[in-house]
Every structure is written in structure tokens, then in C-alpha cells.
Image: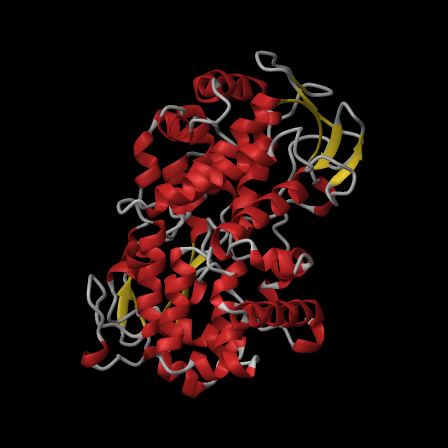
């Protein structure tokens, strides 16, 4: 833990900007465009209010932090809107459990069997896209989700520099997403006026830089490829941190998947969570604040999921000789510190580090702020979406547990708690093995009724 802390503290000798620039280059951003993004605006162009005199690339980072940080009301407004969507979507009255949905395996008028990973993926993608970009984007490009899924599964190839001839899925999906966002940002703002504060502010910053206007007009500019088109999966990776934002979009649905997988396969845990979340579900609209502040078993489970399944890293460039852990790091090297090693450190977590322990963060609440727990990174580049992620994932799980009778379908997928796919590289939370997907039969309940059942008593998770 102390070595990783040193990474965050040595800002001058271990800057994160070099890696950011490398990512931009991988994505195709030209050197001239990159230089423009790092240039300070003239003093005469500094705007009023709380805006600081920073390069566009850093100003957009500030806009994102402002959107997702407590205070000012924007995070609360975004969370409230997110919960409203969850409340509508996780309902038998919605169309989410009909056979027309790709994740619905079979359905009748009384129940449906769903692929949980597919369901959470589509659910969070749809909601997040609408809340960030407004209704226009998905209405004009309803096929966008399929390209996003392909991009999500293959993005690791970009980070690992897999040759292009072996990465057709990556580049095909990227090209399609570029085309979609190019069309979106060429569309008059009057038709997409419901985009949120961050997207609008980021677009303003890019256009005001003198770079985006011409490139948007051409429809194939580097800034569209590397900034606008990749906000969806990277969730602003290049601006905010040297790792993928662990909490947004792709990782939201994985966190929800693992939460449900472990809860369903641990009867005592699911009972405890059900009971402690009852007050939050007493009305038609879930009480998200109660869920976030008064449900310790749910919170501990969320953190334990992140401990077990986070596979991201912190990356820094050695601009000067730097001593870490008694070793001198030479100048001119990229240095990687995987968080997984922290999260499986037996000195911090005990000898059974690979075993799911739902009470881990209950027994010692200080662990969630421990230097040995870094699911959201740290330092100035800590993931700004960490608060939103915890709130909406916890609420989604709570709604499902209270509104549906849930039965594990062991004729498909995993026979016990799913195992993570550690062979396929990832830049956030691990996905489950393809052979270990979780399938649930969900049956709507009348209010006041409750029933959660497995085909047989579960085994401990991995």
C-alpha cells in the first residue's frame, strides 16, 4: 500500500499526462491536435465565474468532477434521475422482460428467465446514455448498443497494442461509434438540448479551442474519435485518470451482476439485505438515500465485490529518477501498479483473500478508506463516478430483490456462484467466464409478498 501511495504523491517525477497522451495516440489523435488540447487559452478568453485558466483537456476533467461530485446539486439531480429510470425499468409493467429483449431467454405472462449480465448491461447502458446525451442519441441510433458491447469486450486489445489484423472487432465497433457520435455532434443543439451539464460543457470547451469546429464539420476529426466517441465506454478515461473509470457504464453492470450473483448464492446475506432495505421500498419510489446510508450489509457486499473483482491499475511515467519501495525507478519508463495485488494482500485481508466475505467491511469499516483498497484509484485522479456508482448499483439490486421472486436457473450457466474470467485482460471489473453466466427466473410479486429461492443450497463463491 505504501508503494502505491508513493505513486500518487510523486506528481512531478511520476506524472500521469504522458500515459494520457499515449492513449490519445493509440486512438488516432494527431500530434497537432493533442498540442492544441494542452495549450493554455489566452488570458483574455478566461471566462467569468469559477472557471480556472487551464488547457481544454484539464478543464473538461474539472467539468466531469463537477458533474459527479457532491455539492452544487448536480450529482443529486443525476442520481435522482437515474433512480427514476431504474424504478420504471425494473418493473413487470415495463417491456424489459419480454422475449423481444436479447437477454430474455424465455418468457410468459407470469415470469421470465433472463441472462443477468445481458440484462444489467443493456439496462445501465440505456440509462446512462440518456442521462448524459439526452433522448436524441439512442432514438437516432437504436443499434448503438450492439457496437458498444463489441467495443467493451475488445477494448483491452487497444491497451495491449494487439495488431490491427487481430483486432477487427475492436476497430469495426470503434468506427461505428465514431460515425454515431459524429452524427450526434453535427446535429443542431436544439435537437439535443437535454444533454447533461458535462457533455454540453465539454463540447463548448472543445469548440472554443478552435480545434473541434473544423473537425466536427469534416465529420471525421481526431477529436471526435478520441474524445466524443469514446466518452461512452472510456467514460472520460483520457481526461480523468490513467485507468478506465471503474464506476461508469461498463463497470456499473458488472458490479450489479456480481452483487446479484453473490447475494443469490448466499441465503443469509440475501435475507439480511432484504430486511435492512425494507424501509426504502415502502413507497412506489425507492428511497435511494436510505439505501445508501442505512444498509450496512448491502454496502459491505458492494465493497467486497470491488475488492474481489477489480483488475485495473495505476500507470505513471518516470520523468525523473524516483525511489519506490527502496528501488530506484529509472527515467523514461512507464510504471504499472496493479490494484489486484493490493486487494489480495493477505497482510491486509487475511489468509482467505480469494473467498467472498460479505462481512469484511462490516467488521472493520475503516477498510473502505484503507490505502490497501483502491477500486476507484486515488490521488487527484480518483474516479469521480464512485459515489454515483455505489448509489445506483445498490438501488438497482434492492429494487429487483423486492419486486420479484427470484430463482436461480441451474440448467443454464453456472451451477454455483459464477467464476471470474481472469484469462481475458480487462481494464475495470472482471467479467464472468462465458460458461458461468448467471440466469434467473424472475416472477413479479404483489406488494408485501416476498420469495427468493434457489434450486439447491449454494456453495461458497470463488
Comparing 356 with 76, the one in front is: 76
Residue found 33% across the figure and 73% down from its top: 56
Q: Quadrant of residue 400?
A: top right
Q: In the rendered picture of this protein, how many numbered marks are placed on residues?
A: 0
Q: Position of residue 455 (x, y in %)?
A: 73, 20
Q: Position of residue 46 (x, y in %)?
A: 21, 74
Left-right relation of 338 to 117 = left
Q: Quadrant of residue 439?
A: top right
From this viewpoint, is residue 382 visible? no
On screen, residue 231 above or below 417 = below
Report the coloring of the rendering. secondary structure
Q: Position of residue 53 (x, y in %)?
A: 22, 72
Comparing 15 with 115, the one in front is: 115
Comparing 361 with 77, the one in front is: 77
Comparing 115 with 49, the one in front is: 49
Q: Quadrant of residue 270?
A: top right
From this viewpoint, is residue 434 visible? yes
**Extreme residue toward the front, this view:** 190
Identify the image quadrant of the C terminus: top right
**Extreme residue toward the bottom, this view:** 32
Residue found 65% across the figure and 42% down from its top: 117
Residue found 47% across the figure and 72% down from its top: 23
On screen, residue 188 above or below 75 = below
Residue found 37% across the figure and 24% down from its top: 294
Q: Position of residue 291 (x, y in %)?
A: 42, 27
Left-right relation of 116 to 7 = right
Amino acid at each position: 500500500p505504501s508503494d502505491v501511495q508513493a505513486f500518487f504523491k510523486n506528481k512531478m517525477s511520476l506524472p500521469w499526462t504522458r500515459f494520457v497522451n499515449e492513449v490519445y495516440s493509440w486512438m488516432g489523435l494527431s500530434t497537432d491536435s493533442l498540442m492544441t488540447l494542452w495549450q493554455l487559452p489566452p488570458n483574455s478568453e478566461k471566462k467569468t465565474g469559477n472557471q480556472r485558466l487551464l488547457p481544454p483537456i484539464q478543464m473538461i476533467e474539472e467539468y466531469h468532477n463537477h458533474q459527479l461530485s457532491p455539492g452544487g446539486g448536480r450529482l443529486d439531480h443525476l442520481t435522482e434521475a437515474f433512480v427514476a429510470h431504474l424504478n420504471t425499468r425494473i418493473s413487470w409493467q415495463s417491456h424489459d422482460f419480454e422475449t423481444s429483449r436479447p437477454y430474455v431467454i424465455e418468457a410468459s405472462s407470469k415470469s421470465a428467465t433472463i441472462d443477468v449480465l445481458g440484462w444489467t448491461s443493456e439496462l445501465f447502458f440505456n440509462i446512462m446514455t440518456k442521462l448524459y446525451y439526452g433522448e436524441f442519441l439512442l432514438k437516432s441510433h437504436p443499434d448503438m448498443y450492439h457496437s458498444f458491447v463489441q467495443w467493451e469486450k475488445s477494448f483491452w486489445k487497444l491497451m495491449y497494442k494487439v495488431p490491427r489484423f487481430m483486432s477487427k472487432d475492436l476497430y469495426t465497433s470503434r468506427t461505428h461509434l465514431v460515425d454515431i457520435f459524429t452524427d450526434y455532434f453535427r446535429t443542431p443543439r436544439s435537437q439535443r438540448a437535454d444533454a447533461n451539464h458535462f457533455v454540453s460543457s465539454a463540447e463548448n470547451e472543445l469548440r472554443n479551442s478552435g480545434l473541434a469546429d473544423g473537425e466536427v464539420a469534416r465529420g471525421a476529426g481526431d477529436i471526435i474519435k478520441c474524445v466524443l466517441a469514446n466518452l461512452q465506454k472510456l467514460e472520460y478515461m483520457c481526461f480523468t485518470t490513467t485507468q478506465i473509470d471503474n464506476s461508469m457504464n461498463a463497470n456499473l453492470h458488472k458490479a450489479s451482476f456480481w452483487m446479484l450473483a453473490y447475494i443469490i448464492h448466499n441465503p443469509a446475506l440475501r435475507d439480511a439485505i432484504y430486511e435492512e432495505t425494507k424501509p426504502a421500498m415502502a413507497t412506489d419510489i425507492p428511497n435511494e438515500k436510505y439505501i445508501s446510508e442505512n444498509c450496512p450489509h448491502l454496502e459491505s457486499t458492494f465493497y467486497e465485490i470491488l475488492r474481489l473483482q477489480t483488475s485495473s491499475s495505476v500507470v505513471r511515467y518516470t520523468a525523473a529518477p524516483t525511489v519506490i519501495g527502496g528501488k530506484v525507478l529509472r527515467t523514461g519508463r512507464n510504471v504499472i501498479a496493479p490494484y489486484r495485488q493490493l486487494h489480495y494482500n493477505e497482510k491486509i485481508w487475511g489468509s482467505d483473500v480469494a473467498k467472498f466475505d460479505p462481512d469484511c467491511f462490516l467488521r472493520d469499516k475503516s477498510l473502505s478508506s484503507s490505502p490497501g483498497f483502491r477500486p476507484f484509484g486515488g490521488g487527484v485522479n480518483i474516479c469521480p463516478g464512485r459515489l454515483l456508482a455505489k448509489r445506483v448499483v445498490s438501488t438497482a439490486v434492492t429494487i429487483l430483490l423486492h419486486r420479484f421472486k427470484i430463482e436461480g436457473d441451474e440448467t443454464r450457466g453456472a451451477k454455483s456462484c459464477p467464476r471470474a474470467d481472469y484469462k481475458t485482460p480487462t481494464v475495470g471489473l472482471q467479467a464472468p467466464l462465458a460458461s458461468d453466466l448467471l440466469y434467473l427466473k424472475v416472477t413479479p410479486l404483489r406488494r408485501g409478498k416476498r420469495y427468493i429461492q434457489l434450486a439447491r443450497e449454494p456453495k461458497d463463491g470463488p
